[in-house]
Image (cartoon, grey):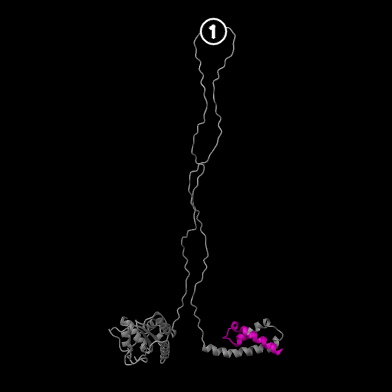
Amino acid sequence: MRNFISFYKDRETADQVHDELLAAGFSRSDVDIYDGRGENAGSAEGDRSLWEKIKEAFGFASESDRQLYAEAARRGGVAVSLDIDEDEEDATEIDRAVAIMRRYNPMDLRQSEAQWRAQGWQVYAGTAAPPISSTPPIATPPMQNQTAPGMARSEEAIPVIEEQLQIGKRRVELGGVRVYSRVIETPVEKEVELRQEQVNVERRPADRPVTDADRAFQERTIEATESAEEPVVRKQARVVEEVSLNKQVEQHKETVRDTVRRTDVQVEQTGKEMAQGAMQGAGYEEFANELATDQRYVNRDWNAVESDARVAYEHRFPHSKWEGVKDSIRRAFESRREVHH
């Protein structure tokens, strides 16, 4: 069994929630209403106190939470309770039930608890809470929080929430450069001049007397060696270029544009301003009619009249702002001019 319970500020709202839950198809025996006297208006268990029902339904809750529910009922809150059997439990049914119960603005018990504690309410220190119908003593709050006799003090707060823009930095990859080397062979050609020697044997006819140089009749051997040059290839490695990597770091400023949200709370008086506006509305009509019929402003357009009109208006209506009514008076002035002409 799962139990859903919400507190509402008055019995009329609780009755509306009760009736809508029944109209949505929930069983009458599973929907109960409990008021501050512990009376059940929705079932035959009218003699059971709300505290007993809360202890039974929320046995797992802390003692302080159960006492909070009891205090809410003691202060006039009316509880609507809905039971759903686990065998019949369905997420859609639960969502429907919760949507109905939330639609009627249930009490925020945590916020109320903080207010009650500020007024002097304390969680009962015993193992069981006092009966709901009893009235435990409440400490007198500070003087600035007291209200006049016969007046009830109630407070609702709208939180003003504001987003703040926080800018951080993170490192992202933008690509890079990869340098690698490999060995390639390139055919080359170069001309070289080579010398080659060759021995030639020549026979020349002669007819002269023998001299000592001829060394007559001696054995002799004359040799001549042939030679030739051939190319010799040598290779010498030389560094002709260097490729290196380095980083150039630049700092720059960038403007980040975004939007932040903030709760804007506007306060306006509804009843008083409507009555005052109605009274001044009639005054606007009369004021515009006087301008249109004033001989000083005959055949003068609004731009020429506005300065004098503002002075006269602020003198007559010192608590009203000219900028808020200027357009209305101008239209009324021009309309009256057309009628009188």
The secondary structure making up most of the magenta span is helix
Q: State the count of labels.
A: 1
The answer to whether any part of residue 306 appears in the image is yes
Q: Residue 25 location, x and y as percent?
A: 41, 87
Give the quadrant of residue 294.
bottom right
Give the quadrant of residue 110.
bottom left
Magenta residues? Answer: 312-341
Residue at the (66%, 86%) spot, across then down? 333
Q: Identify the residue position indicated by label 1 in the image.
A: 212
Is 159 left or right of 67, judged from the image as shown? right
Label 1, secondary structure: give it: helix
Amino acid at pointer 1? Asp
Q: Residue 103 location, x and y as percent?
A: 44, 84
Is 172 left or right of 127, judged from the image as shown? right
Q: Quadrant of the N terminus?
A: bottom left
> Quick check: is 332 in the magenta stretch?
yes
CA neighbours of label 1 inside 10 A, class few (<14), some (14 to 19), many (20+) = few
Q: Residue 134 location, x and y as percent?
A: 32, 90
Is 313 left or right of 6, judged from the image as shown? right
> Quick check: is 222 in the magenta stretch?
no
